[in-house]
């Protein structure tokens, strides 16, 4: 009798689908934002959730409760146990309904793309996701059954999301790709911040999301930011880069208590130096505008910090 193993891959048509990529990006960023304080980073949504440990940490963080007996993900039995505990926790805590037609513990452990995505989308209906989930997403998944006599492929279609607008509206969700909207037109240097006056409502949502993102990091230092101008001397941005990238930045390299305009400009120039070394294009960050408290410039800088998490999750594992 043939022994077999199964792998799942997105069909090329789904890999290149804008809404599929947006869905995966939003769900990954949701988990990474939530787990910032724990310094846990999801790089591959399907592999990293498969043993149940990160998923358990995510549920514990959003619920402010502790799950009992989460096991090391060293065996298949432990992984299935962990995922089942996560599912039961979501059922008990949020009243989430089981839907074995869409997802199962075994599917998540086996890195079944449709199972993992469907579970997270269903969970977002009970636990508000701050990042917009695209509606009416269908994916094509290639099932590769590796058997002794060769490889057997089968492609199946899965409807992952329905009309998500009511859930996005209820959560006040922000569409990350709206922030990067300039990338979708002929002027690649344009972004949503260039048209702040025409997009006041959306900018207000983005501002709230970015300040909340920063405060989740800065709370480790007992600091809370309320206004964009609080960033204008550059100090908090420098600290955030250190916290997000987990690097030590000696205080002698910048002005920790800037007393003059020049000190503040020097700090912002140091920020640009740090980000450039991380491979970030900071051509739109003008030090003088930043120090003067220009909201457009500061928001751009904060969004760069937000994007650092995504750069980490897309980096190849060492």
Image (tube, grey):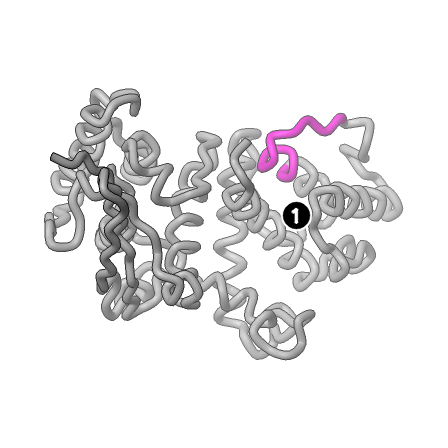
Q: Dot 1: within a 10 Å radius of its alpha carbon, few (fewer than 14), some, or many (20 or more) residues? A: some
Residue 61 % position (x, y): 34, 35
Of the pair 45 and 131, the residue shown nearer to us: 45
For image coordinates 82% across by 27% down, the residue present is 252
Residue at image point 30% right, 53% down: 128
Quarter of the image where one finds residue 221: top right
Give the extent of the magenta segment.
240-250
Q: Residue furthest front?
A: 149
Q: Which residue is mark 1?
A: 230
Camera-side residue: 124 or 184? Answer: 184
Image quadrant occupied by the N terminus: top left
Say whether residue 221 is left or right of residue 293: left
Residue 218 within the segment the image draws in magenta: no
- Left or right: where does residue 58 sit relative to residue 206? left
The structure residue drawn at horizontal position 85% and vertical position 44%, both measured from the top left corner, is 266
Q: Position of residue 95 (x, y in %)?
A: 12, 47
Q: Is residue 248 above or below residue 134?
A: above
- Name the quadrant containing residue 283: bottom right
Q: Is residue 180 visible?
A: yes
State the SS at label 1. Answer: helix
């Amino acid at each position: 009798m043939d022994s077999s193993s199964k792998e799942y891959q997105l069909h090329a048509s789904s890999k290149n689908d804008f809404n599929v990529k947006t869905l995966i990006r939003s769900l990954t960023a949701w988990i990474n934002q939530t787990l910032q304080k724990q310094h846990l980073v999801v790089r591959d949504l399907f592999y990293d959730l498969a043993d149940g440990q990160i998923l358990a940490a995510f549920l514990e963080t959003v619920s402010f409760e502790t799950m009992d007996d989460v096991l090391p993900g060293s065996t298949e039995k432990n992984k299935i146990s962990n995922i089942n505990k996560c599912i039961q926790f979501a059922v008990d805590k949020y009243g989430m309904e089981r839907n074995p037609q869409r997802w199962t513990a075994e599917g998540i452990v086996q890195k079944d793309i449709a199972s993992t995505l469907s579970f997270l989308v269903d969970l977002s209906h009970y636990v508000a996701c701050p990042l917009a989930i695209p509606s009416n997403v269908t994916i094509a998944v290639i099932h590769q059954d590796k058997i002794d006599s060769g490889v057997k492929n089968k492609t199946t279609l899965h409807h992952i999301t329905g009309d998500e607008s009511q859930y996005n509206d209820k959560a006040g969700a922000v569409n990350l790709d709206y922030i990067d909207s300039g990338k979708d037109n002929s002027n690649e240097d344009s972004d949503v911040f260039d048209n702040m006056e025409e997009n006041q409502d959306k900018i207000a949502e983005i501002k709230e999301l970015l300040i909340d993102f920063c405060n989740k990091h800065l709370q480790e230092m007992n600091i809370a930011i309320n206004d964009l101008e609080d960033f204008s001397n550059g100090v908090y941005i420098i600290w955030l880069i250190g916290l997000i990238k987990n690097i030590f930045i000696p205080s002698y390299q910048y002005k920790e208590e800037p007393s003059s305009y020049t000190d503040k400009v020097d700090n912002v120039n140091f920020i640009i130096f740090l980000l450039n070394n991380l491979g970030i294009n900071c051509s739109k960050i003008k030090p003088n505008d930043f120090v003067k408290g220009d909201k457009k410039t500061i928001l751009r800088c904060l969004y760069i910090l937000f994007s650092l998490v995504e750069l980490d999750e897309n980096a190849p594992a060492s």
